[in-house]
């Protein structure tokens, strides 16, 4: 979800005029960025930056026949959008925006647009049909262009699908009679470099002198942040439940082991074994159980995850979404490592009390236990 949000919607970093993100809705054309500036050249040439893609945002009316409805538009550099798509080898990453019918934007079709499937349903428009886009220009006039529908798309947000239009940047500028763009969307080589490169941009004299504001993706992705927080809380509860189950089951197993070998423990201590040796004996047993259990569980988990992902899990549309999806289990080395450490650590923790209890047995009572 994080990667889809970055590559299909926000980019890793967005750069705009100062106060655009807070005041841009009131007067968006007061915050236009020029095409080529020293700041743009600096951003584009920074190591770790893959692409810098201008975006032009606006709103207007879209008409087909006697039907006219409002829309929110986004002018996109279609050529760079194609290059961005080629950077992503995994098609699942582009799942935020999916072209369900027709084709995506193309630099070879300057009048071709794509519209949200919800908006297409309201207009009753299909692939290859003509629509008219009508907007107010910055000078206060009205302008319109005729465009052909290349494709229909949907995203995770039903509200966006019901109002969105994406069109080539040149066509958007022609329609609005402006030059420049509202945002430079920056795509990086590595998501982990977002904070470092954003700080580097803020410190650059060319960026500061141009009065630009730098916003990393995690400050813009409100839906993602709230969803990730919800899932993290759910997983935290699940971790506690699993941990409690492991502690109780291992503690019970180790306690039964101590009770079954009480006579042996008494014999060892009668022969001179120190209490610390008895303690370490049962603690080592717990460590071995933890290693075997955690590594065996990891192997079983990886096998089940691969099998389940191959089949897929059909999921219904979540609240606010218009389409369901097929879920898979994503295996990450860090998550797998934390699972192993959590299982192992919990088992060792659960072994402490039974091991301590074994080491505190009275020698005489232990020897009499089996008689």
Image (tube, helix red, strand yellow):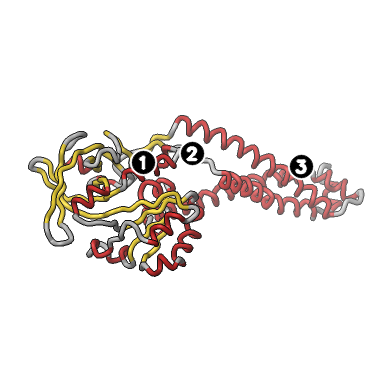
Which dot, 2 or 3, sits closer to the camera?
Answer: 2
Residue at left 13%, top 52%?
143
Which residue is pictured at 66% across the width and 50% down the height?
345
Name the image quarter holding residue 40.
Answer: bottom left
In depth, the one of 182 and 67 nearer the eye is 182
* Image-based side of 284 in relation to 183, left or right: right
Badge nearest the viewer, 1 or 3: 1
Q: Which residue is mark 1?
A: 82
Residue at 54 percent across and 33 percent down: it is 304
- Tag 1 near tag 3, CB within 8 Å: no
Residue 245: which disc?
A: none
> What's the distance in space between the residues labelled 1 and 3, CA to CA?
69 Å
The image shows residue 362 at horizontal and vertical percentages of 83, 54
**Up/down of 100 relative to 200, above or below:** above
Among numbered discs 1 and 2, the one appearing first in the sequence: 1
Residue 215 visible to the viewer = yes
Q: Give the structural element (helix, strand or loop) at label 3.
A: helix
Residue assigned mark 2: 329
User: For the residues carrying marks 1 and 2, which lies nearer the camera in this image?
Assistant: 1
Which one is in front, 348 or 204? 204
Mark 3 neighbour density, 10 Å: few (under 14) some (14–19) many (20 or more): few
- On the picture, is 296 further left or further right than 168? right
Q: Can see residue 218? A: no
**Residue 344, how many percent across, how many down?**
66, 47
Could you say which is closer to the camera, residue 23 or residue 184? 184
Residue under label 3: 260
Give the quarter of the image for residue 371: top right
Label 1 Cα neighbours within 10 Å, binned few <14 / some 14-19 / many ≥20 = some
Q: Earlier in the sequence, mark 2 or mark 3?
A: 3
Q: Secondary structure at mark 2?
A: loop
Image coordinates of residue 277 in percent, x first then y, are: 83, 51
């Amino acid at each position: 979800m994080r990667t889809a949000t970055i590559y299909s919607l926000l980019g890793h970093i967005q750069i705009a005029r100062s106060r655009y993100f807070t005041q841009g809705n009131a007067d968006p054309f007061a915050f236009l960025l020029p095409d080529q500036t020293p700041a743009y050249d600096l951003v584009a040439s920074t190591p770790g930056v893959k692409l810098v893609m201008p975006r032009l945002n606006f709103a207007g009316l879209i008409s087909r026949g006697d039907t006219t409805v409002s829309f929110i538009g986004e002018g996109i550099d279609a050529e760079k959008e194609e290059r961005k798509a080629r950077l992503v080898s995994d098609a699942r990453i582009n799942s935020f925006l999916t072209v369900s019918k027709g084709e995506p934007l193309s630099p070879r079709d300057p009048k071709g647009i794509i519209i949200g499937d919800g908006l297409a349903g309201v207009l009753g428009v299909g692939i290859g049909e003509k629509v008219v886009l009508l907007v107010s220009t910055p000078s206060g006039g009205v302008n319109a262009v005729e465009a052909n529908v290349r494709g229909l798309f949907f995203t995770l947000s039903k509200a966006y699908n019901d109002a969105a239009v994406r069109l080539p940047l040149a066509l958007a500028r022609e329609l609005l009679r402006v030059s420049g763009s509202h945002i430079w969307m920056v795509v990086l080589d590595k998501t982990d470099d977002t904070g470092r490169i954003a700080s580097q941009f803020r410190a650059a004299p060319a960026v500061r002198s141009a009065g630009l504001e730098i916003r990393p993706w995690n400050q813009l992705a409100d839906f993602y942040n709230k969803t990730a927080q919800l899932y993290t809380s759910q997983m935290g509860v699940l971790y506690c439940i699993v941990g409690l189950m492991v502690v109780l089951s291992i503690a019970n197993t180790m306690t039964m082991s101590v009770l079954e070998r009480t006579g042996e423990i008494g014999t060892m201590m009668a022969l001179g074994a120190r209490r610390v040796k008895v303690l370490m004996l049962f603690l080592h047993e717990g460590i071995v159980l933890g290693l075997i259990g955690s590594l065996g569980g990891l192997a079983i988990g990886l096998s089940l995850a691969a099998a389940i992902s191959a089949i897929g899990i059909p999921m219904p549309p979540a609240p606010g979404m218009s389409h369901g999806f097929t879920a898979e289990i994503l295996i990450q080395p860090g998550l797998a490592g934390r699972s192993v450490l959590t299982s192992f650590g919990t088992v060792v923790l659960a072994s402490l009390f039974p091991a301590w209890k074994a080491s505190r047995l009275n020698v005489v009572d232990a020897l009499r236990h089996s008689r």
